[in-house]
Amino acid sequence: MLEIKMDLLKDINPNKLPKHVAIIMDGNGRWAKQKGMRRTFGHENGTKSVKDVVETSAELGIENLTLYAFSTENWNRPKLEVQTLMKLLVSSLKKEIKTMLDNNIKLNAIGNLKTLPSKVYKELFDVIDATKDNNKMTLTLALSYGSREELLNTVKEISIKVKNNIISPEKIDESIINEHLYTQNLPDVDLLIRTSGEKRISNFLLWQIAYAELYFTDTLWPDFTKQHLYKAIIEYQKRERRFGKTSEQLS
């Protein structure tokens, strides 16, 4: 396994790393079902993959990593599953604060955070505050997040400012919209990874992934290791990112 890891590392160009990687961590429930266990067992084991991917991203030098941890639609899941996910979030934050401090990782969160249970909200912002001066990598957790809700709120906020003559309609451009998104301090996504074989975006960072490279893998999230992340980055580096231009223009 070590030999495979070194071979994959050798194939990664450190000068062409994506500045922002976003991951839809999918497949915990199916992973547990395959083993005859409850869905919550899958979520518990999925935290190991989170730790692996976060540490590997920091080691590689990726500046921004955003994880889709809990969507606005996830509140509709069975009560026990939601409670388990919230407990896991709190315990993981407590457990990993030392890792974030040791690896110079800054924690960030996006979404309708006020809807989180008070204990989760407090723990989240305690860790955000404790890591606010770290600058090697920004780890963003998308919690109670939905991109359509984000865009709707953005439209409302800008509309109010136009109504109050704070912003002129003629001045509204992409930068103004970016300033009103949850991700206002983050660059656009370069690489979007989704695990479990599903090939859809699921209401995640719809504005921010306009020019992202999409990478889908059949691997279920609890089985996703640093080797899988290496493969995704190697595939990303093979692609030609034209941003509307021709290959000839780029060369």
Image (cartoon, grey):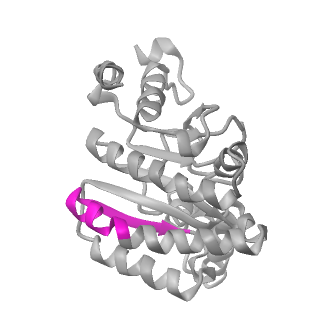
Above-or-below relation of 36 to 225 = below
Left or right, 22 with reference to 30: left
99 in the magenta segment: yes
117 in the magenta segment: no
Above-or-below relation of 48 to 75 = above
- In this view of the protein, can residue 158 be seen by the observer? no
Q: Which residues lie in the magenta part?
A: 95-110
- Identify the residue at the far front of this view: 36
Residue 145: percent from left, percent from top: 63, 65
* Near-viewer residue (139 or 41): 41
The quarter of the image holding the N terminus is top left
Above-or-below relation of 242 to 90 = above
Residue 20: percent from left, percent from top: 43, 45
The quarter of the image holding the C terminus is top left
Q: Residue at x 30, y 47 (%)?
A: 58
Q: Residue at x 69, y 52 (%)?
A: 29
Q: Quadrant of residue 166?
A: bottom right
Q: Quadrant of residue 70?
A: bottom right
* Near-viewer residue (43 or 114): 43
- In this view of the protein, can residue 228 be seen by the observer? yes
Query: For the image shown, how many numbered marks are present on the structure?
Result: 0
Left or right, 74 with reference to 52: right
Q: Residue at x 29, y 38 (%)?
A: 60
Q: Quadrant of residue 157?
A: bottom right
Residue 170: percent from left, percent from top: 61, 62
Residue 191: percent from left, percent from top: 50, 38
* Near-viewer residue (176 or 17): 17
